Amino acid sequence: MNYTFQFGVLWDNGAYLAWGLWHAWWTSAPSIVISTVLGLVLAAASLSRMRAARVPAVVFVDLFRTLPVVVLLVWIHYVLPILTGINLSATGSSVIALSLNGAALACEAFRGGLSAIPPTQTQAGHSLGFSRWQVLRYVVVPQAFYATLPALTNVHITIIKNVTVTVLIAVPEVMFRAQELTVQFFRPLELYTGAAVLYVALVWGYTVLMRSLERLQKWQPI
């Protein structure tokens, strides 16, 4: 294969390509927050003794965990407006799709963390006079959060990487810009290599942040 790499195209257009990271983060950050909160609610519901809360949570997780993100994204952006008359921006559709998929994955991570807390912890909280809400807030959730953090970090990284799928609906993130530049300069290997490096940097930076958060734990669960 006679191919001569010309990485000068990255030097000339690196700023334009790197600016796509802002759009990638602006899409993934709200998705991470929404999926984390919704995942925690779903995990609590799936562990509830009430069938009315448990069954919808299980159905939600099974549905959005199995649906491919591409199918979900296209359906929300193109089909949902036809059914409801509500037009969503490309970024809005992406946040909804990534949040629904991420919430299903986060639910399983949280469910594992909540299930790992021994029942004696809850009993001890009640013996101190705590209400069910206080036990959940001060005893169960703090321990479950740190126990879940490594798995939750993987869910968040998956959300960040899935942002690349939004190129299908023209979200101007890194891959979209790499495609634009490829059409202009016909240097796909260099430009997609640059896009890969930028996403690796973004994921690595987020991983370092989450590991720093893990080190804030001053105690170990009993």
Image (cartoon, helix red, strand yellow):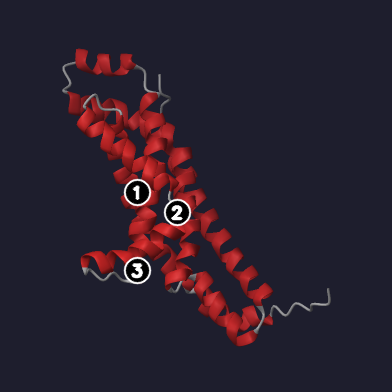
Mark closer to the chain start, 3 or 1: 1
Q: Amino acid at mark 1?
A: Ser
* Label 3: element kind: helix
* Label 1: element kind: helix
Would you identify the image quadrant in which residue 148 lies? top left
- The residue identified by callout 1 is 35
Q: Position of residue 113 (x, y in %)?
A: 40, 30
Give whichever of 176, 50 is nearer the camera: 50
C-alpha separation, residue under disc 2 versus residue under disc 1: 9 Å
At x 42%, y 71%, the residue is 169
Query: Looking at the picture, does residue 55 appear above or below residue 128?
Result: below
At x 30%, y 32%, the residue is 46
Query: Looking at the picture, does residue 145 appear above or below residue 123?
Result: below
Residue 27, label in figure: none
Query: How would you rate the neighbour count of disc 1 (Cα within 10 Å): few for under 14, some for 14-19, many for 20 or more?
Result: many
Q: Amino acid at mark 2?
A: Ile
C-alpha separation, residue under disc 3 versus residue under disc 2: 21 Å
Q: Position of residue 149 (x, y in %)?
A: 43, 38
Q: Nearer the viewer, mark 3 or mark 2?
A: 3
At x 20%, y 16%, the residue is 126
Left or right of 207 in this view: 115: left
Query: How would you rate the neighbour count of disc 2 (Cα within 10 Å): few for under 14, some for 14-19, many for 20 or more?
Result: many
